[in-house]
Amino acid sequence: MLSISVKEFLFWKKLQLSKGGDHQSLALLLDSVGGISNGDLNSLHINPEGNLYLKKNLEFLESVWNEHLLKSHPIQYLCGIAFWRDLKLEVTDKVLIPRPETELIVDIVTKIFGKNSQKLFFAELGTGSGAISIALALAYPLSDGVATDIDQDALEIATKNFIKSSKQSNLKFYCGNWWSPLENFKGKIDLAISNPPYIPKDTYEKLPKEVKNFEPKVALLGGEDGLKHIREIIQKAPLFLKEKGWLILENHFDQGEKVKQLLIKNKFTSIEILKDLSGIGRFTIGRYK
Ligand SMILES: C[S@@+](CC[C@H](N)C(=O)[O-])C[C@H]1O[C@@H](n2cnc3c(N)ncnc32)[C@H](O)[C@@H]1O
């Protein structure tokens, strides 16, 4: 641990923010690499004459911050950490950085099934860092979940994240294309969730460089119209869901109506397009018959 004066640290912090970036990203760097939590940061002003202890020196922290600013390298990848709901998740460039809007999926599930007493069998398709499945496994400790991904490296990260976040063993991970690793669970699933790759090809080409240059293409690109994977997931869902089982999908900002039509075509009922906090129809949900 390195000791420096609070005054020197606060001066350094102000200087870093004057170069660009936001408070939240700098706080993530200070917490995950510097060893200074948000709570520590907030209490510094109480004792400006004191000292604080850092895990890495200011030169090192500044070099990471400069890399973030100059190359648009996401701070989560540089630090290897993303905060999502109340989880602290390991992330590498093999997984999508879990987004704040996706946090609402857990609230949608809670609205449908109530809080924690339910014994559900849920499946998440395309789990990435494991964020959604881990949050559900923790919220519903009596339930069992299965989570899939096409990418074995992503599954290894999701597995580590689950082990770090929970002492339970109610979540299992499987590698393969969408439903295919779940053949043994046909007709048994109460709830399936997916935030699949849904960016249309021409939009993908124009994504900001912090996304396009760093996040996995396999996690973002949804074919020509963005609906390639959503179509496949909906078409096969009736084989795997129980009667009246729920499917919850995240989609691109303008896809809600098309996803709704796909659900209707595949005999889903109780279909709704739900908005995210920006008022965008971000989630489309339905029940199989
Ligand atoms: C948009 S990311 C979502 C990750 C995570 N669930 C989240 O919400 O942060 C989509 C995920 O689907 C996975 N994926 C892409 N194609 C797949 C396929 N054919 N079968 C299974 N998973 C796939 C990607 O590897 C990626 O982890």
Image (cartoon, rainbow, N blue to C red):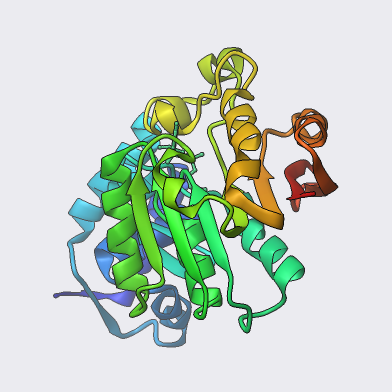
User: Residue 29's x, y, as percent?
Assistant: 34, 57
Task: Tell which of 276 and 32 is nearer to you.
Answer: 276
Image quadrant of residue 38? bottom left
Residue at the (63%, 78%) spot, across then down: 118
Where does the N terminus fall, quadrant-wise? bottom left
- x and y percentages locating residue 22 in the rendered image: 51, 50
234 with respect to 42 (left or right): right
Q: Is residue 122 left or right of residue 259?
A: left
Residue 286, x across and y down, in percent:
77, 48
Q: Is residue 268 left or right of residue 182?
A: right
Relative image position of residue 73 (x, y in whole percent): 36, 36
| Nearest the eye: 93 or 235 | 235
Query: With 199 as the anchor, is 182 left or right in this view?
Result: left
Q: How many marks?
A: 0
Residue 7 visible in the displayed image: no
- Which one is nearer the viewer's eye here, 170 or 126? 170
Q: Residue at x 59, y 26 (%)?
A: 199
Q: Is residue 159 above or below residue 288?
A: below
Locate residue 227: give its quadrant: top right
Q: Residue at x 49, y 41 (%)?
A: 179
In this rendering, does residue 223 appear at all? yes
